[in-house]
Amino acid sequence: MQQDYLLPLADAERLIAGFNACTLPKEEWTHEAHLIGGLWMLSQFGDKALDEMRTRIKRFNESVGGVNDDQNGYHETLTVFWLWALREMFADDDGKLYWNQDAVDDIIFDETLADRNLWAEFYSKERMMSVEARRQYVAPDLKPMD
């Protein structure tokens, strides 16, 4: 019997391929897609995942007519935060993350990760929405990311 998933792994892989090739429609680059992309980057590139995510998000934004400036597009601190959140949830005891159906299901079903404003537990809005936080990583001002 075939199991039904909200997002089968093959569809998640097509999403990643479209993102990487800059052929994914802009409207499909959702919060959940960012998280799926982050998990894929972490599982494929480990400690280099942030560099890959930064480069690929900027390139994707530009490919769909967006800009990466002081008000729009790529946001360094948000990217660091969400990669940290994914590591917290998915890393095994050795710090390794795996790309599989269970992990994709967990991203789709996890209420904590679904909260686009999870960062607000750690950052004030003023700090997170600052030009400095968009350009470079800034540490939380409300609660440390352990």
Image (cartoon, grey):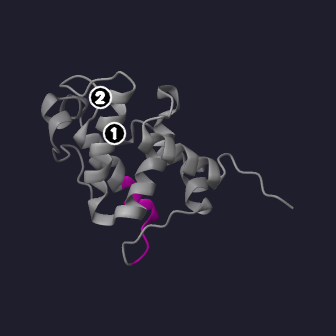
Q: How many marks?
A: 2
Residue at 34% of width from left, 53% of height from top?
83
The residue identified by callout 1 is 57
Residue 95 vs 31, above or below: the answer is below
User: What segment carries the magenta color?
Assistant: 85-93
Judge whether residue 51 is colored magenta: no
Q: Nearer the viewer, residue 34 or 124?
A: 34
Q: Is residue 78 left or right of residue 23?
A: left
Q: Secondary structure at mark 1?
A: helix
Q: Nearer the viewer, residue 51 or 5?
A: 51
Q: Residue furthest bottom?
A: 94
Mark 1, Cα crowd under 10 Å, few <14 / some 14-19 / many 20+, is many
Query: Against 111, is 65 above or below?
Result: above
Q: Position of residue 114 (x, y in %)?
A: 50, 42
Q: Residue at x 20, y 25 (%)?
A: 69
Residue for point 15% across, 41% down? 136
Report x, y in % for residue 41.
39, 56
In screen coordinates, is 8 left or right of 77? right
Predominant SS of the magenta segment = helix
Q: Earlier in the sequence, mark 2 or mark 1?
A: 1
Q: Say the numbered circle drawn on residue 40.
A: none
Tag 2 and tag 1, C-beta contact below 8 Å = yes
- Of residue 133 and residue 65, the one placed in the foreground of this image is 65
Disc 2 residue type (three-letter): Gly
Residue 50 on image: x %, y %: 28, 53
Which residue occupies the extreme left position in the image?
A: 132
Mark 1 is on which residue type? Ile
Q: Is residue 89 magenta?
A: yes
The residue wearing badge 2 is: 73
Question: Image height check: is 102 above or below 54?
Answer: below
